[in-house]
Image: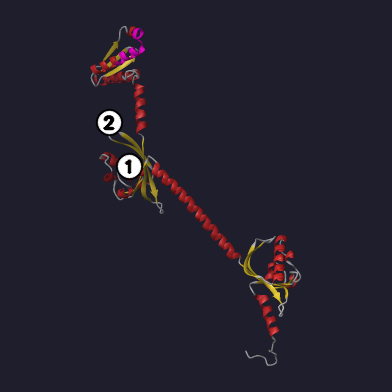
Amino acid sequence: MEPDDDVNWSLSAEEIELICARNVMATAAEFIFLKDLHSRFIHASQGVSAVHHRTPEEMIGLTDFDLFAPEIAEHWFAEEQAIIASGHGFVHREERERWPDRPDTWVTTTKLPLRRSDGTIIGTFGISRDITARVLAEETRRAGQEQLAAAHDALRQVESRLRAVLDTTPDRITQFDRQLRCEYLNPAAEEALNTSSAAARGRTLGELSSMDQSTIDLWEANLQRVITTGTETEFEFSIGSGDATRWFHARVSPEIGADQQTVGVLTVSRDFTALKQAERKLAHQALHDSLTGLANRALLMDRVTRSLLRIERQAHPVAVLFIDVDHFKAVNDTHGHDIGDEVLRELARRISASVRGIDLACRYGGEEFVVVMP
């Protein structure tokens, strides 16, 4: 557009500066303010005025004491007076603004001495930019990082404790994939199988263990059942024979993947041989005489009852011998009960040696013995 020849476009430098200042004050995103020597507002941008819910004209003559909490206003007043006195300000300093009626905000502020053209200080000049969104985002990120670090630390502690449990427990812990190949052995399992976890990886139980085939079949059947059903199971198995037999209780649990499918199994085997032996000992004590080791009256009555029932079905006779030791009281009275007990034990050994394997020798009570002979 061609300029209007009737308009005088010749402006002085002062007028240009004034026009620029007014436009900046009216449109700038920053908060711009001018204060006199007493820290009273002599000019405020539209942004500053809007923050305080006032017009630029209403801001004239106010101080920070009219706008902020006393402790904040006192701090800023002292700061501005120091700038006026020293002639030195600061640039881009982050500050937190506290408001009585709204959440806190954060700004970066530049405050410098306000000078005339001859350099005389007539007040202060300030520019602030709101950085609340950035600060809150950083705080959120920092809080997230702290939470993540705390979660990682907690995870490391749990992992450390779990590792301590895996390394020190006497239970044998193993991990198998869906093809029943070993993926992990804890130290107790390594010792039992005489191999390392690394060497065992990818091998089946049959390739790792010297257990008999029936026990391996039992294991693999239970592992496959858990993989197929996704439900936990338990079973017992033994290793060895005779007095060297060791008993174990095994728990097999499914390992569930992200797609909620069974990706493998985790097994925990616990040696309960001592418990098994204790149970057998208790069972033996319940049916046997503690002094002689022969069957007691309870086992005798059970055997006689079974024999009578068998007679009814198959007409097989059974002989029952009652053995009584004469004058046994004289042994106790003359030589003492310890000798009497040894006599009873010797009698039990002789009776046991005199009967067949299918016969039952029993101490009926005191010095009375019974033998049931099918």
At which x and y percent is residue 236?
Answer: 34, 37
At which x and y percent is residue 177?
Answer: 34, 50
Q: Residues within 10 Å of mark 1 (few under 14, many from 20)?
A: few
**Residue tagged 2:** 242
Q: Residue 24 lies in what quarter of the image? A: bottom right
Q: Residue 81 lies in what quarter of the image? A: bottom right
Compare marks 2 and 1 and give the one earlier in the sequence: 1
Q: Magenta stretch? A: 332-345
User: What secondary structure is marked by label 2?
Assistant: helix
Judge whether 99 appears above or below 226 on screen: below
Judge whether 20 appears above or below 133 on screen: below
**Residue tagged 1:** 191
Q: Residue 13 vs residue 184: left or right?
A: right
Q: Nearer the viewer, residue 312 or 156?
A: 156
Residue at the extreme bottom: 5
Residue depicted at x 49% and y 50%:
154
Q: Residue 52 vs residue 324: left or right?
A: right
Q: Quadrant of the N terminus?
A: bottom right
At which x and y percent is residue 201?
Answer: 31, 50
Q: Residues within 10 Å of mark 2 (few under 14, many from 20)?
A: few
